[in-house]
């Protein structure tokens, strides 16, 4: 169980679209306005876990054309979120970014987030500790994963808010937002490269 908990920490805390967008929106909009987005991520993460547990994710991703459509949708949406972060508060924005995304945006991100599926598949199918009682093991895994997920994402949100509260000059804040957006694009590139290698 401790090995599983450590794996959850290491896999969730590493930068991915969820934590990067959480920090980015925290920096761009502040803590309270970004909480709805984090709630959407939380609901989406649990939706992905249930899809992995039920086998639905494996069935969907076993269809090559559907896997490519979902990857395309994922890349397009992650590019959109990166633009929202990168151009938040910028007068030269080509995208309207005056208000933070809500629950639906977080839910959608996790639904098409390649890292969410990879992490949850690894956690659910590996690190067994109660093979004689699968229902108990899955329940405990869900509880542990959520107990760790919440503070990690709130920590990333707080880190973004801490940048926001520094009251940096507008051009510095814009550069930070763009840097976070570029980090997110790098994750998108890695996910796309990994998917193409596996195809």
Image (spheres, rainbow, N blue to C red):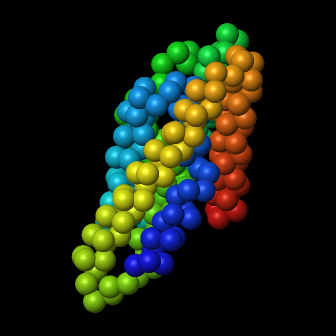
In the image, residue 141 sits, relative to residue 177, either above or below, namely below
In the image, residue 96 sits, relative to residue 18, either above or below, namely above
Q: Is residue 73 visible?
A: no
Q: Residue at x 36, y 66 (%)?
A: 144
Q: Residue furthest top?
A: 91
Q: Residue at x 64, y 27 (%)?
A: 166
Q: Is residue 137 visible?
A: yes
Q: Residue at x 55, y 32 (%)?
A: 161
Q: Quadrant of residue 175?
A: top right
Q: Nearer the viewer, residue 78 or 85?
A: 85
61 sits left or right of 72 in the view: left
Q: Residue at x 50, y 27 (%)?
A: 30
Indicate the position of residue 42 as horizontal and vertical percent values.
Answer: 38, 47
Q: Residue furthest front?
A: 166
Indicate the position of residue 106 as horizontal and vertical percent values.
Answer: 43, 38
Q: Nearer the viewer, residue 147 or 117?
A: 147
Tell me the quarter of the image containing the N terminus.
Answer: bottom left
42 sits left or right of 70 in the view: left
Indicate the position of residue 19 as horizontal and vertical percent values.
Answer: 54, 46
Tell me the quarter of the image containing the C terminus.
Answer: bottom right
In the image, residue 135 sits, relative to residue 149, either above or below, namely below
């Amino acid at each position: 169980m401790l090995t599983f908990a450590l794996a959850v920490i290491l896999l969730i805390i590493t930068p991915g679209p969820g934590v990067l967008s959480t920090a980015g929106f925290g920096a761009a909009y502040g803590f309270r306005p970004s909480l709805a987005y984090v709630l959407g991520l939380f609901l989406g993460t649990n939706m992905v876990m249930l899809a992995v547990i039920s086998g639905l994710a494996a069935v969907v991703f076993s269809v090559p054309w559907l896997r490519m459509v979902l990857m395309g949708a994922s890349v397009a949406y992650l590019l959109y979120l990166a633009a929202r972060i990168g151009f938040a508060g910028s007068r030269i924005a080509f995208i309207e970014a005056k208000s933070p995304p809500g629950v639906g945006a977080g839910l959608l991100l996790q639904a098409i987030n390649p890292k969410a599926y990879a992490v949850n598949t690894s956690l659910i199918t590996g690190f067994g500790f109660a093979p004689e009682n699968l229902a108990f093991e899955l329940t405990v895994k869900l509880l542990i994963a959520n107990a760790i997920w919440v503070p990690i994402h709130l920590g990333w949100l707080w880190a973004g808010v801490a940048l926001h509260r520094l009251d940096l000059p507008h051009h510095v804040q814009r550069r930070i937002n763009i840097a976070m957006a570029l980090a997110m694009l790098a994750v998108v590139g890695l996910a796309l490269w990994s998917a193409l290698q596996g195809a």
